[in-house]
Amino acid sequence: MSGRARLTLCSAAATLLASCALLPLVEPATWLLQAAFLLAIQSGAGAAARRVPLARPLTVAVQALVTLMALTLVFARGHAVLGLFPGPGAFRHFGDLLQAGADDIGRYAIPAPLSDGIRLMVIGGVLVIGLAVDTLAVTFRNAAPAGLPLLALYSVAAGLFDGSADWLWFLVAAAGYLMLLLAEGRERLSQWGRVFGGVSHGPGEPSGPVAPVRTGRRIGMAALGVALVVPLLPLPAVQEGLLGGAGAGVGAGNGSGGTISAVNPLVSLRDSLNVDEDRTVLTLRTNSGNLSDLYLRIVSLDDFDGTTWKPAKRHITAVPDDFPAPTGLGPDVKRAEITTRIAAAGTYAQDWLPMPYPPSGVQIKGNWRYEPVGMTLVGDHGQNTSGKTYLVKSLDVQPTAQQLASAAKAPDAIRREYTKVPDSLPAVVAQRAREITKNAASGYEKAVALQDYFAVTGGFAYDTQVEVGSGPGAIARFLRDKQGFCVHFSFAMAAMARTLGIPARVAVGFAPGSPQADGTVTVSLKDAHAWPELYFEGVGWTRFEPTPTRGSTPTYTLPETSGQTQPDLPQASASASAAPSAAPSASASCSATDRKLGNCADPLPLDQAGQGAGGAPWYRTAAWALLGAAALALPLLPMLWRLRRRSVRLASAQHSAASASGAPPRRKGDAGGLRDGGEPAVLLDVPPEEASEATARHVLAVWRELTDTAWDYGIEPDEALTPRRAAARIVRIGELDETASRSVHRVADAVEQVLFAPAPRAESGLADEVRRVRAALRENAGGATRVRAVVAPRSAVRAVWDLADRWSALKASWAGRLATLVRRPSRRQQPSG
């Protein structure tokens, strides 16, 4: 492969590796295969244009045109001329797709679904970066600046995705860039001839720039290692409270200018509760007659990893005019719609919008998005609550104890997601939960027993000075010490409820504030609170209050609670009562995003039945099976190739060489440079009738097997030695005994016979000699060397050399045929008059 072709291939590969950083942003990842195919077309067009050759600007223009035609064929075939050439209609269609993609990006959270608009933006962006990298690295032969577009591609993905595997995508992108630099350096050095010569790695191949390339690899790997390791070192850092001016968590507020940015509402609770000077963050006015139940919910935490609770990554959509009915709420549960107008202080910059739960509608200005699973609003593009005034319509759901006690089993989708507990959770948590609820007959009674244990009977004390705690044992320590604040109580009760099979999550927000003389209610920092929400079918997500001296105990958990003893509340209007119907249509209450996430209770059994009847498609099963087989076979390829090559070589030596007559072909130099197949690399002009091809081939194959076996056990071949000296070197380094030494020299003598004797005699038993030498080398080697000789043999690199030789021969063959086809016929001189 020529240097320019290798550089072209590395350029496309580097772009593709860098684009892997986009994989966490969009699902499914099928776009990567399409991008790879189109990138190959783009690179091929550039290689063909440079082969002509065209001027550099024309080469770039050709690539851009081919890229545009390829995108037209894939995305706008129905709007193009002849389905391939873009016209006004195709460009309008591209504009519509890009606009739709931009809307989808604003509508969905990570990972976004692969809509046509997003697919065009992702694939088109990869092709633009690929064109820039190919132009810089190959057309203008300057690979170093090509790292800038690769960095831009990686930076876009890293800026949008906050996953824990960022280092992996950086490593993949950096490896692609390093490969591109090495290819360019090799191509440049090859133009200097053999100034930096080295030992040939394959027979018949000229020496390459081994030393500089090796040095470049070492420098590149060292730099890459430093870039990966340094960020992991425990360097000094400025630690601020998450209500301070910086942080990283759910939202995007920066807290600058004295504002309060509740980036991570969980850990910031302790800071809010312990402030020296309390301050009002929200002022509200409501028509609810029961202020004790007016909790302002910010966000729900439903992902429990054993260490902490955090919001799960969800899709977000545009804010609907009327919110769908909350999940699980049945028609028999009494509810009333209340209206609350909330004003946020200018110093309170929260990314999530505090609202009573469950909301049925919100009127607010600004860039906000709706998360349908948690029924929350989150700011978009830096939007926050600072100075905002908004109107929230919500439902005051009033279940009875009887309705909660008789609740049916939760849908499978909710149970799967909200009863998961990690294996790292200490066993004492589940054990204590069973002890507390041993006399409970229903899920509701178990929930009330847990609440009463923490708030009344368990001897727990409320203390905001207790550390939040971290690690799998935090809940167990809290159960032992019995001191903490709302985070500890809500965490522990939600985790215990999950161990009992009750769907549970943690809500973060504000407890009911303080009524004022003017009819308003003020909510301050010290009202920050966390509480558990448990799911009961027919009622939905239901608040419980396990924290002593905080908030208010729900009336439906009190012993005297009944349908007749609930406090008088404003009656819901007919329209309000009709809105939260318990049996909403799929289109009204279950969006496409909800169906995708499996949060629609009604359609789920139908989906499961369909899946159970048909099973997974056969082609998907076959694809996964092939992928698994390939993953298992890939590490074993060197061993399998080596076993096959040894079998072929030694089998050829078993055949009798008696039929071979005459002298074998001679070669120039010694036997060290013979090809794997046994043919000499360079032959002298010896008549074929004086050579015995059969004898030469099987003897030289046995010699190659002997030297490769020694190589597998750490004795690298020396191409400059004669067979006799090479045999002596193997005996000396391998510390072989007398028997194995005779075997090595016998094979070497046979090689000299077929190379130099005028009438060589056929040898038998050479395969057994090689097996004897291999056994001796294995006996003298250490354990690690033995394993490597079998699993990862060094001589397996000859497979790569063989492929390179065959590829070069194939290119030369096709080049000769093409030259023959396009060669002009010679002009014969016409005889003169």
Image (cartoon, helix red, strand yellow):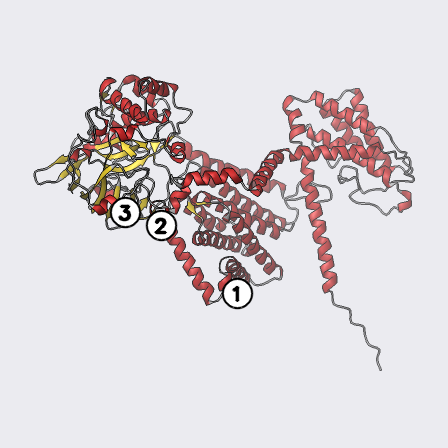
Mark 1–mark 3 distance (CA, rounded to whole Å):
43 Å
The residue under label 3 is which amino acid type?
Gln
Answer left or right for 552 relative to 583: left
Q: Nearer the viewer, residue 116 or 465?
A: 116
Q: CA distance from mark 2 to mark 3?
A: 13 Å
Q: Quadrant of the C terminus?
A: bottom right
Give the percent coordinates (x, y) of residue 159: 39, 44
The first of marks 1 and 3 along the sequence is 1
User: Are discs 1 and 3 less than 8 Å apart at CB?
Assistant: no
For discs 2 and 3, the disc positioned in front in the rendered view? 2
Taking the spot 82% from the left edge, 76% from the top edge, the residue there is 830
**Is residue 147 shown above or below 544?**
below
* Structural crowding at the residue carrying mark 1, measured as other residues with C-alpha within 10 Å and reported as few (<14), some (14–19) or many (≥20): some
Query: Closest to the observer: 824 or 414?
Result: 414
Q: Which residue was labeled with disc 3?
A: 383
Residue type (three-letter) at the residue carrying disc 1: Phe
Q: Residue at x 73, y 57 (%)?
A: 816
Image: 137 above or below 312 = below
Q: Residues within 10 Å of mark 3 (few under 14, many from 20)?
A: some
| Kind of element beneath mark 1 | loop
Q: Marks 1 and 2, Cα distance to the nearest angstrom?
A: 31 Å
| Residue 51 pos. (x, y %) | 62, 59
Image disc number at residue 106: 2
> Which residue is under mark 1?
85
Left or right position of 445 against 10: left
Quadrant assignment, res 249: top left
Instruction: Pinpoint residue 832: horizontal percent, then vertical percent.
Output: 84, 80
Q: Earlier in the sequence, mark 1 or mark 2?
A: 1
- Residue type at mark 2: give it: Gly
